[in-house]
Image (spheres, rainbow, N blue to C red):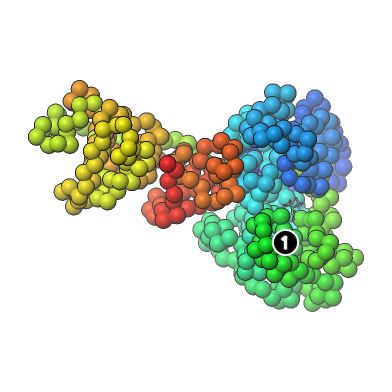
Amino acid sequence: MKDVISMRNLLREDVDSLITTALDLKQRKDGCERFRGKKLASLFYENSTRTRESFEQAAVNLGMSIVGFSGTEGTSVKKGETIADTIRMYSGYGADMFVMRHNLDGAPQAAADVLNVPVINGGDGCNGHPTQTMLDLMTIKEAHGTIDGLKIAMVGDLRYGRTVHSLLQAAELYEFEPWLVAPENVAMPSWRVDDFRKATSRDVVFTNDLMEVIKNVDVLYMTRIQRERFPEGPEGQTEYKKISGKYRLMAEMLKSAKSGLIVLHPLPRYKYDCEIDVDVDKTLYAKYFVEAENGLYMRQTLLAQSLEAGFNERKKTDLDNRNLWIDQEIKDNPKPPHNFLYRITNGTLIDHIEAGKGRAVTRVLGLNEYSATPLIVARNLRSERYGKKDVVGVQDKELSDDELNKLGLVSSGATVNIIRDGRVVRKGKVNLPHTLENVIQCPNSGCISAPEHYEHVPARFYVEEREPLMVRCHYCEKPLGREEIRLKV
Ligand code: NCD
């Protein structure tokens, strides 16, 4: 795997080795310009100080040159250029790797899909920030000597804050106990907690009592309320004001801290409501500036690893759709001519559709009463398999792979007959494919694949579980159950 897009894809052994190497680099502090002549494209569509500076400084230490931008002001993004077009240009000018931060969930994934060189996610919308998590883990390991067995509390904006999403994913690799402390309207999305539970069979601790947390945990991970990600307009502002300043850590609160507690924060902290009071800075608990400094060593290690060897992939995304179609024996050929359904001379007959789904089938195939294609929809016919079934016949149309995908999703198990010159020439059962491209619309409006952003990336989902059905967005990682699926038409 060339890219670092999400903690979901990474293996513990790779993260362990990055931490060890980065801690070692911190001791040695050698620049070693190993990658002289290599070019980093540093594309920060969104504000950043630490992440961008540490990546760029790390690249300088490695002898690399840097191109790119910090904020889109002055670039053609402002003229309405897509991400794909912008990055192709940097690639054409010889970039050997990319670091990208973007306000849309899944933007670095979309970039990685079109580039042959490594892409590192420097923070994507509300989704993830994997390299932040790596330097967080490095700081925890440095302070505690271990990550396993600890209690790590994430406090503040767990809904819009991407750093805590990646940190919770890291709890699938390390045996720490996540404590989640957040006002109700910015709680950790329940699907993220479910992902953790499913992957580990362990549970999180929910609490709102910060004093109780301080007495019990080993790491207090404070976060900023992500004001810029609240819905625009007065409602969003009211929501924001309700919670800004709700969790505020002050030095005297740490008197009852568990021994060895460290306080982390990805920074920046908000100077007006101060989720960590400046008094805390002077205490031995404060490790957030060390954490930021560690970012340089971790990112230097990451850049080198990406350029040299890449990473192992944990959750292999299987793009194999071979089981999409299972050939069946052609019997009774030609079909009895008295049956109106079999009057199709050239085209497709879709049989054994679950009763009631005939209309959904025609809809996903883009066929309706207004389309020019002759169409037969028969409902509630007798069927040995379902008791009742629907059947759809389309004259002069053979289904494309995309259409078979859609059919497999809507009515897995349907039989497709391809008819030429009045004879069935091919017959098969469609299955639920592994990858669904342009079939499902991602309901997350912050996802790069949402059409309103005009980034022209194909909506793509993976089938993670078949019974009950669960699919996951390739970009924003959001899982959907059958009832949440909206078909793209
Ligand atoms: C964080 C981010 O951008 O997600 N900052 C960072 O990278 N250190 C956290 C934040 O902005 O609150």
Q: Position of residue 359 (x, y in %)?
A: 30, 46
Query: Could you say which quadrant of the image residue 300 lies in?
Result: top right
The residue drawn where x is 18% and y is 52% is 387
Residue depicted at x 15% and y 48% = 382
In the image, residue 45 above or below residue 259: above
For image coordinates 72% across by 58% down, the residue present is 227
Give the quarter of the image for residue 413. Answer: top left
Give above or below for 476 relative to 375.
below
**Compared to 204, does 44 lie above or below?**
above
Q: In this rendered view, identify the residue nearer to me: 7 or 348.
A: 348
List x then y, in percent, for residue 379.
21, 47
Q: Is residue 38 visible?
A: yes
The x and y percentages for residue 99 are: 72, 38
Residue type marked 1? Ile
Residue 154, image x and y in percent?
69, 63
Which one is in front, 141 or 434? 434
Residue closer to the observer: 267 or 170 = 267
Where's the N terminus, which quadrant? Answer: top right
Residue occupying image coordinates x 77% and y 28%: 39
Q: Specify whether residue 217 is in view.
A: no
Q: Is residue 468 left or right of residue 230?
A: left
User: Is residue 31 toward the left or the right of residue 113 in the image?
Assistant: right
* Residue linked to disc 1: 225
